[in-house]
Image: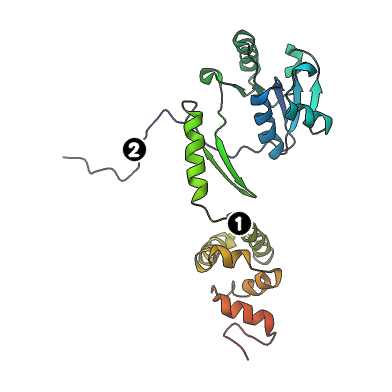
Amino acid sequence: MSEEPTKFPEVQGGGSLIIAWQIRGKKVLVVGGGEVAAGRIFHCLNADANVTVVSPAARLNPEVAHRVAQKQIELVDRNFEPSDLDGADMVLVAVDDPAASTVIWKLCKERRIPANIADVPPECDFYFGSVHRDGPLQIMVSTNGKGPRLASMIRKSIAKQLPSNAGSAIDTIGQLRVKLREIAPRPEDGPKRMTWMTKVSDAYSWDEMCGLSAEDMDNLLRFYAPDKVPSLDVLKEMGSNPDTTLDGPV
């Protein structure tokens, strides 16, 4: 008896699990203070992490020195010591010393601390990809450590195809979801909430979504119970004419 063709995607293997890692308030230890470290620090600060840098102050590049001066990060003005790993939730190593980097990586493995050793893929628990950021929108392209420059080119190509106001539209959707949960908070409301939000996202363009005011969103939520989504003209009419009903002007 022949087997039916599979309907499921083929496993490729060799990839990474790309996730949005929440490190808000976590302690990130960065060893090194050069250009690579500066990029790592910037990404961690964008994720609201608490960053400690271990490096002689004389070796800090201008950007890292600026962040120290602004008290955005804490500086330990010396070379790395094993005790620096105490309490660390993540370790990023960016120094021009392969032997020292490997020692730190091994210490991290012993303590089960996730670590990234710059430019040494075999000594990385995770990779930094090329990231496009627009407000709440983050898009990362990863080549699994094989082609960082190529990842940057692909990321720029993707970014050029995105609407210029994508981040603002996503902010609006986020605000609308918060308001929706206030009027339909029960777990059993979940399926209807998701279905209705899908209809809303399909009904309006990026520009229209960005133009929704707080009043527009409140009026839009009146259509949730009957599971409808009005045209933008109807929604705006409701804002200018308080007597407008869900079926149109009175």
User: Which image quadrant is residue 101 in?
Assistant: top right
Residue shown at 70% from the left, 23% from the top: 30
Residue 42 x/y as whole percent: 69, 34
Residue shown at 68% from the left, 69% from the top: 213
- Residue 47 visible (yes or no): no
Mark 1 or mark 2: name the one nearer the start of the chain: 2
Residue 207 against residue 248 in the figure, above or below: above
Q: Is residue 82 left or right of residue 126?
A: right
Circle 1 Cα neighbour tier, 10 Å, few/some/many (<14 / 14–19 / ≥20): some
For mark 1, what is the residue?
Answer: 170
For mark 2, what is the residue?
Answer: 10
Residue 83 x/y as whole percent: 76, 14
Residue shown at 63% from the left, 71% from the top: 221
In front: label 1 or label 2? 1
Circle 2 Cα neighbour tier, 10 Å, few/some/many (<14 / 14–19 / ≥20): few
The quadrant of the picture occupied by the N terminus is: top left
